[in-house]
Structure formats: structure tokens, C-alpha cells
Amino acid sequence: MAITICPDCQREISDAGQVCPGCGGSLKAAAPQDYELPAWFRKAAEQGDDYVLFVLTLMFHIGAGVPQDYEQVAAWYRKAAEQGNASAQFVLGSMCLGGYGLGGYGIPQDYEQAAAWFRKAAEQGNTNAQNNLGVMYDKGDGVLQDYEQAVAWYRKAAEQGNAFAQLNFGAMYSKGDGVPQDDQEAVAWYRKAAEQGHANAQFTLGLMYSRGDGVPQDDQEAVAWYRKAALQAMATRKSTSGRCMTRATTPCTRCTGSWLSNARSPR
């Protein structure tokens, strides 16, 4: 496939017209360039090297060195996932949700398939997949609702430092779902996520201080965490277009994904 390079902004454009969609510059002087993947690279992918498969898929996804080609993205992700690549399994599960900013790429929404791919990745230690599988058990999407299973997967990811899982694990303690209700334990996990810069966790921790749940009531501390959350939210909205999967509390600061439509507060 021919790729046109804009002479003004150096943007790569496929099926270009007369004007660059990026900078508005004229493309009349732009020279088309053909890309060909190194033979060894494509051969390694076709033979099932899961790492090369995953890298190749990312290349097609973002148009890095090859034409951006969404038609090939899902097929290559699936091939890498079937070869056992945990990152590809996680992404393919997200695509089955029709979320993660991937738009589905022609894959029908299927929560059972999503859960199956998340499980494969989670069992390999992928903390994002562990968190997402926890959410699916928490909500009963694609699997039978099971708070104890949700807690188990949240715990695995949370103990490895996944901030989304730490927030979700804390929410289980706040509600007493799958674990004994314990505001102090909830605060401890909210704090871990908040200290990693997770805006929802920062807001929730502020809420706990405001109410005096699990901590001494302290309006100044509450305001400090609310302020951190607000600053994080502004920064994150500028840099993130994907969807996240979180159980907790307040409007999500990473996205407006449908996974948050039934979110519940700690109280």
C-alpha cells in the first residue's frame, strides 16, 4: 500500500487527497512511499512467535512503519492470543467488550468471550486482566455473579500494585461484598491507589475523610485529596481516550465508559 508523507508535517497518510488532514499543507509535492515488512519479521509472526505477533499487531494498530489497518488488527491480536501472549489475550478480551477505546474492530460484543480471554491472561499474571475478570464477577457480566471470586481476582492484582484493582478491592471492603465490611481496610487500599495517582481513589479517600469512615473525620485532609483528584482528572482527560473497568464510587476520571454506568458508592 502506498503511503504519502506530508512534506510539511511529515505525517504518514494513506489514500491521501490534495491536502494533508493533519496540517492542511499541500500534498502535491509529497512522494508516495511503499512499506514492506522485513521478511524475517512477517515469517516469525506467521510461524507463531507470540511476541512478534503482538508487536506486529501494535504496528498495524497505530500505523508504526506500516499502514494503519484495522482490518488486520483483530486477526493478528487473535493469533497472538491463541499463541498464549497474555497482553494480546487481555486486549482481545477488551475488544470483545466493545470497549477499551478499540471500538470492537468488527468483533461482536460478547461478555462470555471477554471473560474467557481475561481469564487466560489473568492466569498468566496479567494484572489488568485480573482486575477486569474481578469486575466481571462483581457485576455478573459473562459469568455468574460471585463476590468471593471478584475479591480473589481483585486481591491478586491489588497486591501486585494495580491501582484500579486496589480501588476496587477497597470498594469491596466498603460495601462488605465478599469480605467482612471494614472501612479501615477500605481506606488502606484506597490510599494505595490514591498514592499512585488514581483520581477516583483520591476522590474516594477524600470522601472517607469527609465522612470519618475508617479514618478520623478531617475536612482539611478531605479537601487535599479532592484537590489531587481534580488535578489528576484534568490531566488524565487530556491524555486518555480508552475505557477502564472500575467498580467504585464516583464518576470515572479516565473515561465515560458504560462499565461505570452502574457504579456504586462506598456508602
Image (cartoon, grey):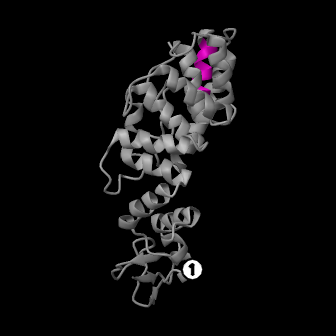
* 3 left or right of 231 in image: left
* Residue 201 x, y percent position in the rendering: 59, 28
At horizontal 48% and vertical 72% (from top left) the residue drawn is 46
Residue 246 visible in this rendered orientation of the protein: no
Q: Residue at x 38, y 64 (%)?
A: 70
- Badge 1 element: helix
- For disc 1, the marked residue is 40
Give, as a three-letter code, the residue at label 1.
Trp
> What is the magenta range?
201-210
**Where does the image place residue 263, in percent across and percent down from the top left?**
43, 25
Residue at image location 35% in from the left, 66% down from the top: 71
Measured along the vertical axis of the image, is residue 101 above or below residue 203? below
* Residue 49 on the magenta span: no
Quadrant in the rendering for residue 21:
bottom left
- In the picture, measured across the screen, residue 189 lies left or right of residue 242, that is right
Q: Nearer the viewer, residue 21 or 139?
A: 139
Decide if residue 121 is in sight here: yes
The N terminus is located in which quarter? bottom left
**Image spot of residue 78 (x, y percent):** 43, 57
Q: Main secondary structure of the magenta part?
A: helix
207 in magenta: yes
Q: Quadrant of residue 105?
A: bottom left
Q: Residues within 10 Å of mark 1 (few under 14, many from 20)?
A: few
Tell me: 113 left or right of 154.
Answer: left
- Give 213 or 157, whichever is nearer the viewer: 157
In the displayed structure, 73 sits above or below 207; it is below
Q: Nearer the viewer, residue 119 or 219?
A: 119
Q: Position of residue 120 (x, y in %)?
A: 50, 44
Mark count: 1
Which residue is more in the foreground, 138 or 17? 138
